[in-house]
Image: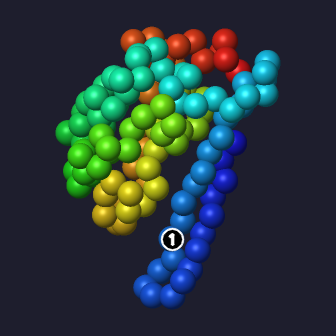
């Protein structure tokens, strides 16, 4: 479940941000990003920062993302949501890049069993 909020506090433009929550249907408990990853918690920042590095290298829209900021924010509680194709780890505008970049998103395909557990077993 995602929720988008838009705020205008004056100035040139307002800001929008999303929040997301996923719940297991069996237990009703909220699922954290760490619950979906097949890597140890201690490696989340390193492994996912490498994925963002690859995105930065291949997508010109993401050339200005700050990998140091990303590395500092990635962990078991990092924001994500589920899509039809994979797990989307995201940062809202201004969190890890200039506002003009917008929301920074990395989709980890469900087929990436080196990074993800079988998500269907959790939901």
112 lies above or below 103 = above
| Picture residue at 79% right of the left edge, 18% below the top | 26
11 lies above or below 23 = below
Query: Can residue 33 be seen at all in this image of the molecule?
Result: yes
Q: Position of residue 43 (x, y in %)?
A: 33, 23
Question: Residue 107 is drawn in which quadrant?
Answer: top left
> Left of 53 or right of it: where is 84?
right
| Picture residue at 54% right of the left edge, 60% below the top | 17
Front-most of residues 75 and 123: 75
Q: Position of residue 90 (x, y in %)?
A: 46, 44
Residue at numbered disc 1? 15
Quarter containing the C terminus: top right
Task: Report crowding for label 1: few under 14, some 14 to 19, many 20 or more residues within 10 A (C-alpha).
Answer: some
Of all residues shown, which one is farthest toward the front? 42
29 lies above or below 61 = above
Quarter containing the N terminus: top right
């Amino acid at each position: 479940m995602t929720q988008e909020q838009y705020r205008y506090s004056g100035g040139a433009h307002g800001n929008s941000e999303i929040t997301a929550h996923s719940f297991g249907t069996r237990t009703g408990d909220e699922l954290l990003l760490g619950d979906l990853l097949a890597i140890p918690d201690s490696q989340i920042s390193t492994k996912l920062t490498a994925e963002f590095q690859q995105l930065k290298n291949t997508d010109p829209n993401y050339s200005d993302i700050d990998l140091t900021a990303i590395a500092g924010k990635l962990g078991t509680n990092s924001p994500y949501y589920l899509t039809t194709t994979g797990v989307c780890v995201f940062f809202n505008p201004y969190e890890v890049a200039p506002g003009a970049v917008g929301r920074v998103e990395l989709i980890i395909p469900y087929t990436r069993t080196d990074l993800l557990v079988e998500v269907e077993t959790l939901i």
